[in-house]
Image (cartoon, rainbow, N blue to C red):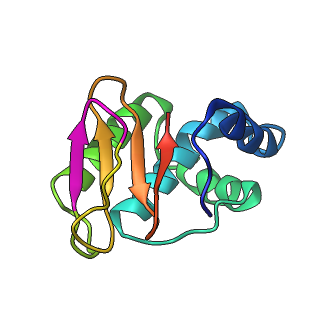
Amino acid sequence: MAVACDSQSLVTQAQCLFPCIPPGMVPYAKIVILCATLNSTVMDCSAQNLVNQAQCLENCIPRGMVQYVELALLCAINSGGSSGGGGGTNCGTSDPIAAPSGSCGIYYRTDNGGFWYWNGSAWIQFIV
């Protein structure tokens, strides 16, 4: 699902998740999404699905390790550890504009930590 990355659109989308995902589950939900990205898997990002999958991880990953797990996943994505098509990971200090060379891609903004993925027709920001 394409989402505009202006502040109002992002807040509107977040308001759908906010009452349904407990704050303590958000880091684990991010790991779920990063794993799906690494494996080039399109996933159901409904609040209930994210909570269900995050609960499984919460039982196995100590809270103090969450950020390090995220880093490991981001490094794997960056190094081309994905089984997806061409395009790979790109980075820069401005928002992505041009389509990736292949059918999929990830973009990391080095100055503010933002992440985008290519949905086949547009860049979608998934970490602000």
Q: Quick check: 44 left or right of 75?
A: right
Left or right of 62? Residue 23 is right
In this rendered view, identify the residue nearer to me: 28 or 96: 96
The quarter of the rendered structure image containing the N terminus is: bottom right
Compared with residue 62, is residue 106 higher up or lower down, i.e. above or below? Answer: below
Where is residue 43? Give x, y as percent.
56, 69
x and y percent of residue 7 in the render? 64, 30
Counting every numbered tag in the picture gives 0
Q: Quadrant of residue 102?
A: bottom left
User: Where, by quadrant of the figure, is residue 96 drawn?
Assistant: top left
Q: Is residue 76 in view?
A: no
Instruction: Between residue 126 and residue 22, name the one nearer to us.
Output: 126
Of the pair 82 and 92, the residue shown nearer to us: 92
Q: Residue furthest right?
A: 19
Residue at the image point whose x is 74% and y is 37% from the top: 22
Q: Residue at x 72, y 60 (%)?
A: 46
> Who's the residue at 40% across and 34% down the image?
114
Q: Position of residue 123 (x, y in %)?
A: 44, 54
- Judged from this view, the residue extending furthest toward the front is 98
Name the foreground residue: 63 vs 43.
43
Q: Which residue extends farthest top?
A: 111
Q: Position of residue 95 (x, y in %)?
A: 37, 38
Q: Is 57 situated left or right of 110 in this image?
A: right
**Which range of residues does the magenta coloring cover?**
88-95
Specify whether residue 111 is in view. yes
Question: On screen, 112 above or below 12?
Answer: above
**Residue sitting at x 36%, y 69%:** 39
Is 65 one of the magenta-colored residues?
no
